[in-house]
Amino acid sequence: MPVHPAPPTDIPSLIEAYRAVVTSFAGVADGLRDTDWEQPTTCPGWSAHDHLAHVVHLEDILSGSDHPVTGWSEQAAGHRHSRAVKVGSPQHVRNDFGVWIEEGVQARRDRSPGELIAELRGLMEVRSASMYDPDLTAQTLVPSVMGEQATFEELLRLRLADIWVHEQDLRELVGRPGSLDSAGASQWTTYIMDALDRVVVRRVKAEPGTVVILETTGPVVARAGVRVGVDEADQPIGRALFSGHTEAPSETGGDSDSHGASSAPEAHPEHITTISLSTDALTRRAAGRRSTADTAYQVVGDEDLARRVLDAYVITP
């Protein structure tokens, strides 16, 4: 599943990309007008100010600070996953993780954008300095969100994608596109492509023999495919197609399944559906910021299946 430009491949380049995505996000925030900050964005329930507060909250937590629960959740003491939010029960808060995120946003509700941007830039320096610890490896377990742990590499990749998505939320609000070929864009696109199997097989429940190919046309260029088959228990299973940026799946072989074995497609050409979108269209749809009806895409094959796949293609929490 090639992605070009590719996301960072080692720790030094991940740290550099982290600094770049935070710097870019802060730069976009710096350019917003006073009247922009309380405007609603396409992220349900959130204003521009909420996006900034959220990014600062997570960077603060990951720098070692305590989560600002006290005063924002009822029965907070001793309850890491309290469901009661002082501001009520917003429709966009659907689970424990959403509650935890909302608490961090609300705790900074009264802070000015300028204060938050300055705090974010300071946190970037603190966080990136700690990343150069010679004892850290890609697989070192480090504190993550909600008291959990993640590997150092996993957490860095998640932060790249999350901050980049929220930068795009701000850019979309003020009509200033950009950073669509950055490391954050590549990492988020990689996550989207990796999700194709579970979307097609588990969510859409496509029939065995179905082949779905998803491709972005740029600035990040990527292509992934899945062939729906059945396992020994006659249960649906997705087999990843191996393809380059411009190669079509072969009728006579050359594709490989998820186990790396070469095999011919289990479908006739009329069962192959290819969905093509720009980087912006695909990443906005997968973030749940744009409906399928409002997304520009092209289909070769089954248009109803393509719509169902895109309807199911939201991978944010």
Image (spheres, rainbow, N blue to C red):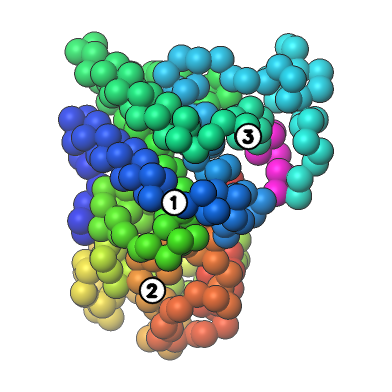
- Name the residue located 21 percent from the left edge and 74 percent from the top edge: 246
Secondary structure under badge 2? strand
Question: Which image quadrant: the C terminus?
Answer: top right
Location of the N terminus (image quadrant): bottom left
On residue 277, the disc is 2
**Mark 2 against mark 1, which lies toward the viewer?**
1
171 w.r.t. 308: above or below: above
Position of residue 72 measured from the top left corner of the image (x, y, whole percent): 73, 25
Side of 14 where 202 appears, left or right: right
Task: Please rate how many residues cluster around mark 2, counting C-alpha atoms within 10 Å: few if below 14, some from 14 to 19, many from 20.
Answer: some
Pick the front one: 115 or 123:
115
Q: Is residue 7 above or below residue 204?
A: above
Does the magenta-highlighted stretch encompass residue 230?
no
Disc 1 target residue: 32
| Residue depicted at x 50% and y 64% | 285
What SS does tag 3 mark?
A: loop
Q: Which residue is mark 3?
A: 109
Q: Quadrant of residue 263?
A: bottom left
Q: Which residues are magenta?
A: 92-100
